[in-house]
Image: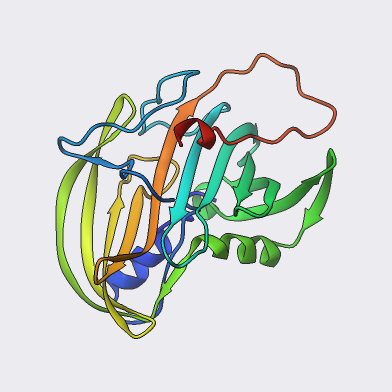
Amino acid sequence: MNRILLSALVSMLAVGCGKAAVQTHAAAPEKAAPVVVEERPAIATTREAPAKNADKPREVGDYVVYRFSGSFQKAPITLTERVIAHDKDALVLDVVLDDGQKKHELRVRTSEAQATQGEILSVERIEKGNLVPMATADYEALMAKTMLIADSNEAELGSEEVTVALGDAKIPARQTSFRVKVGGRDATMRTVVSEKFPWGDVAGEIAADGDVLYRAEIVTVGHQETTAKPATTPVVAESDYDDYE
């Protein structure tokens, strides 16, 4: 599930015109962008612990909260991902997608093997304390709620190296702007990506004539130690997003 946010979009835009999906795994939108470029203030981290060094692999206890907003949806969507276990060559995450009407709680296993890193191995819904198998296609349809499809990529407008502050960590990133078509409208898309951020891409936005059609951003990222023994029934990660309203 690594890089379910913007990577597909960026790769498609890089090769020229065609449909491109701004995905998130999230992640996320809205307030002052949680991406801190240059001198802008850093995003808030959790009360439990400061953000980890962003270029290290994800460990049990690491989590991220993405938010997606803009006129493409009636209400913002939040996506929380938390690492709960390493299982051989797989990473096990609890995922909570809240679309404002329903909270979807999932347990997702993704490959950590070099040849298939990020590939979805299995998905289960967490329903009343039980794990219920979920088809990958249904999971992808749910994640599609965090995406906006651009009709075409007209041109790359420019790219620059920037510094992004994520809590206490500062990482190098690339900010790129594109001219795109969305629903027949001329729009500008901006992406911020970094190979040093283990959760995937950092931010994205599509705007047309002052109207923000889509925004994906990180609300918070951090690590929370847990000393509790594994529960006999599933307990999913809860989003701390309300603390940042």
Nearer-the-camera pick, 147 or 8? 147
Identify whether 241 is placed above or below 131.
above
**Which residue occupies 41% across, 61% down?**
70
Direction bottom: furthest residue:
184
**Which residue occupies 75% across, 50% down?**
124
Identify whether 66 is placed above or below 220.
below
Q: Position of residue 214 (x, y in %)?
A: 39, 62
Q: How many marks?
A: 0
Identify whether 39 is placed above or below 160.
above
Q: Position of residue 145 (x, y in %)?
A: 56, 63
**Does residue 69 appear left or right of residue 234 in this picture?**
left
Q: Is residue 65 visible?
A: yes
**Does residue 189 appear left or right of residue 110 in this picture?**
left
**Does residue 198 appear left or right of residue 155 in this picture?**
right
* Colour scheme shown: rainbow
**Does residue 106 appear left or right of residue 220 in this picture?**
right
Direction top: furthest residue:
227
Nearer-the-camera pick, 32 or 11? 32
Q: Position of residue 215 (x, y in %)?
A: 38, 57
Q: Position of residue 114 (x, y in %)?
A: 50, 48
**Which residue occupies 41% across, 20% down?**
50
The picture quadrant where one finds residue 199 is top left
Q: Is residue 3 visible?
A: no
